[in-house]
Amino acid sequence: MNGNKAEIIRILQSSGGKPVSGQEIGSKLGITRAMVWKYIREIRKDGYEIKSSPKVGYALKSSPDMLYPEQIKAGLETSLLGREILYYNEVESTNSIAKELAAKCPEGTVVIAETQKKGRGRMGSEWQSLPGGIWFSVILKPSVPLEYTAKITLVAGLAVSKAMRELGVDARIKWPNDVLIHGKKVCGILTEVDAEVEKIDHVILGIGINANVRQSEFREEIREDSTSLEEEVGKPIDRIAFMKQLLFELEQQYIKFTTQKFSDIVSEWISLSDTIGKEVTVTTPVKIIEGKAVGVTDKGALLVKTKNNVREEIIAGRCRYSK
Amino acid sequence: MNGNKAEIIRILQSSGGKPVSGQEIGSKLGITRAMVWKYIREIRKDGYEIKSSPKVGYALKSSPDMLYPEQIKAGLETSLLGREILYYNEVESTNSIAKELAAKCPEGTVVIAETQKKGRGRMGSEWQSLPGGIWFSVILKPSVPLEYTAKITLVAGLAVSKAMRELGVDARIKWPNDVLIHGKKVCGILTEVDAEVEKIDHVILGIGINANVRQSEFREEIREDSTSLEEEVGKPIDRIAFMKQLLFELEQQYIKFTTQKFSDIVSEWISLSDTIGKEVTVTTPVKIIEGKAVGVTDKGALLVKTKNNVREEIIAGRCRYSK
């Protein structure tokens, strides 16, 4: 979206519903009233409801429920994440787009879409990405060794849980990369990396959130185990406000991660974990481990105590709770 | 290169210099003698010297010193590595090409070039890739967790050293990714990975070897610390034969790696290591470790015992020997 359009929206939003004259807007932006009027018409086409009263000015009545970058950026309290946002109505997968663009984009660039046709879960599994959800990927370029990659998934899980808890729901993290509310999945995280062994080139952190989605809309196979923020809060959430909060939390945790304060992240992660204390079966490409999840190491590995009292450290795997 | 051309070269090579008639070649390939003659002319253009005597036939006098795929494939004792070889005279970087093609190529595909204009060392450093060297990348797709990546560098270092030792030189591995002869660098390895946390999508294993390169050709800054197989053996090596041996060794070690016999690799790696027992300074993106290199763990990490008697496990880093 054009910078002037974004600025006009910002001016109208910050007036708190009070009309702002075309002249005032024009003088702030250094453009004519006729140009202001031209932009107002374009902004209306984007779904914003704007009342225009002769000699009084323009008043914003409602904003569309879309994840428009200028809406997310307005008042965003981050200095790195989301300073660049690429918006799409529909994509195959935000992670795929972010991967293609990673080399050319600054760190912190966000790729966001209203829906994904081929949303990806881990290990190539399909992820249902319904309209009303929040589907985005962040391009990160931390100067850390490859072995730190797993920690980034924990960073993201913690940030998502904390942002959700601000809505008053009991979001908890299922190791390694799901966020649950009342045991049902509300968010999935897919961390992909491109690296040399001793240094990450870039990480694509894909986050998918069932925000304003109804239980009945989920595919039947996953319906019982899935939930959404709308269902848990009891009404649709403000996706823009949530996105601002989430990017803020994510940046806070990411800063701790890059400044070697991972132990802080681990303790908070454990306090919000759904997994620690449970009997689990973890499947990795090379082995299956059964036992009790007892902690997370400072390397980001899940600690599982097996029946034979062996403590296994698992960096990544698929985790199922034993019934 | 056309399959018939490759087959004709193979027939002429395996006759040991004795002439083979056009009729014999034609009947083996199911083509006319006129077609055989057409291919012979093309083969000559590729640099093969072929004597043609009327009523006697064709005899191969010499092959060009080029890394042609059909030459490498002839008699190659591998079942996975090098079954597909993409050959280039000059490229920016074989790793970059392999990276672009990885999704579409079968595992084991080799990208090889006579020279690289922008050969890459680790961490974006430049690597001088002179004609006469061997510059190639292998596309690997092991079903293992991301944390196994560092092991692949060890696999490659071991294979390169073993192949070189067949030439009678005392090749030794400098952790993590250089091969030295008499303390001078003869090979560099660059391992790049594209992955989810719990499963590698693909690894690009880039191997650069100073094969038939003269000491005087190296850039001045690196000349003192570099050597070549030609310098060490005392004459130019047969690059094709060496490449066959190297792909064979690499496949042997890679099979051990994928079948969870990494401990075998570690013990042989240690026996050929130049680093173990030395005082080292290892720099990673997050810390610097000084101490004595005392071993390699079953995760592929270098074990360094510091002055304070702490045993540090380092997965990857830049290693310098303390003087």
Image (spheres, coloured by chain):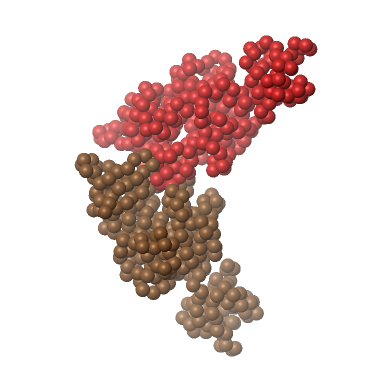
Chain colours: A brown, B red
Can residue B186 be seen? Answer: no
Q: Is residue B204 above or below residue B273?
A: below
**In the orientation shown, which residue stands out farthest toward the bottom?**
A55
Residue visible at 32% across and 29% down in the picture = B295
Residue visible at 50% across and 65% down in the picture = A114
Can residue B233 be seen? Answer: yes
Q: In x, y percent, where is residue B150? A: 41, 36
Q: Residue A113 vs residue B270: left or right?
A: right
Q: In x, y percent, where is residue A58? A: 55, 83
Quarter of the rendering containing residue B276: top left
Residue visible at 25% across and 51% down in the picture = A279
Q: In x, y percent, where is residue B235? A: 57, 15
Q: Is residue A66 above or below residue B60?
A: below
Q: In which quarter of the image is the N terminus of chain B?
A: top right
Residues B200 and A72: in front is B200
Q: Residue A304 vs residue A5: left or right?
A: left
